[in-house]
Amino acid sequence: MAETIRQLISEEDVDRRIYELAEKISADYAGKSIRLVGILNGATFFLCELAKRITVPVSIDFMQASSYGGATESSGTVRIKKDLDESVEDLDVIIVEDIVDSGRTLAFLGDFLKGKKAASIRYCTLLDKPSRRVVDLKSDYTGFEIPDLFVVGYGMDYDQKYRNLPYIGVIEFTD
Ligand code: IMP
Ligand code: MG
């Protein structure tokens, strides 16, 4: 099967929206500092662009949860593949994700960080597919809500491909 990528959100629109999210976060956390916890691997591109535009002090750490592998459907169970390197105790944490689908990954990681005694936890995701939600999870900072499409680019992959596209595209399969 051949794969083609159709652009859904341009590089300019993504960049502009990240700038807006960073402005909002900087205002909400005025006088504080933020620990950004990025979810590997997909959130790395978004996290870098977001962090560069936040004007309050920021530190970063990363976690990795079980992923889709080569398929486009979630298995339903979440596993931690890489834990935090630093303690989040008493810190204001924002978990940074590329896309929320069922919501299982962020719900699980949010509960995990609550158990690690973070002072506060919020969620920031570049994309959200609300129609796909199976658990009660609401993102605090969302770049774009999109329909039920499988997207790639800006860090997001299909079978480890297309992460480096500077825009967000929809993958389409033809025989
Ligand atoms: P959830 O746990 O079902 O919310 O799944 C979230 C994770 O699934 C994200 O971190 C992505 O890695 C992956 N994912 C969900 N939808 C897409 C997509 O459209 N493209 C690429 N990855 C996706
Ligand atoms: Mg991910």
Image (cartoon, helix red, strand yellow):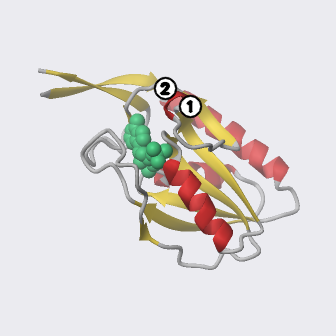
Which residue shows up at 54% across the image and 58% down it?
108
Q: Quick one: quadrant of the C terminus?
A: top left
Q: CA distance from mark 2 to mark 1?
A: 17 Å
Residue 88 sits in quarter: bottom right
The percent coordinates of residue 172 (x first, y second) are 27, 23
Height in image: 167 above or below 42? Answer: above
Residue 130 marker? 1
Amino acid found under the numbered disc labelled 1 = Pro
Check residue 9 in the rendering and tell me which mark sits there, or answer none: 2
Question: Ligand 1 shows up in which quadrant of the image?
Answer: top left
Residue 155 in view (yes/no): no
Mark 2 secondary-structure assignment: strand
Between 51 and 135, the residue placed more toward the observer is 135
Q: How many marks?
A: 2
Compared across the picture, whether 147 is left or right of 71 comes to right
Say whether disc 2 or disc 1 marks the residue closer to the N-terminus: 2
Residue 114, can we see it?
yes
Residue at 49% in and 23% down: 147
The amino acid type found where label 2 is placed reads: Ile
Residue sitting at x 52%, y 32%? 129
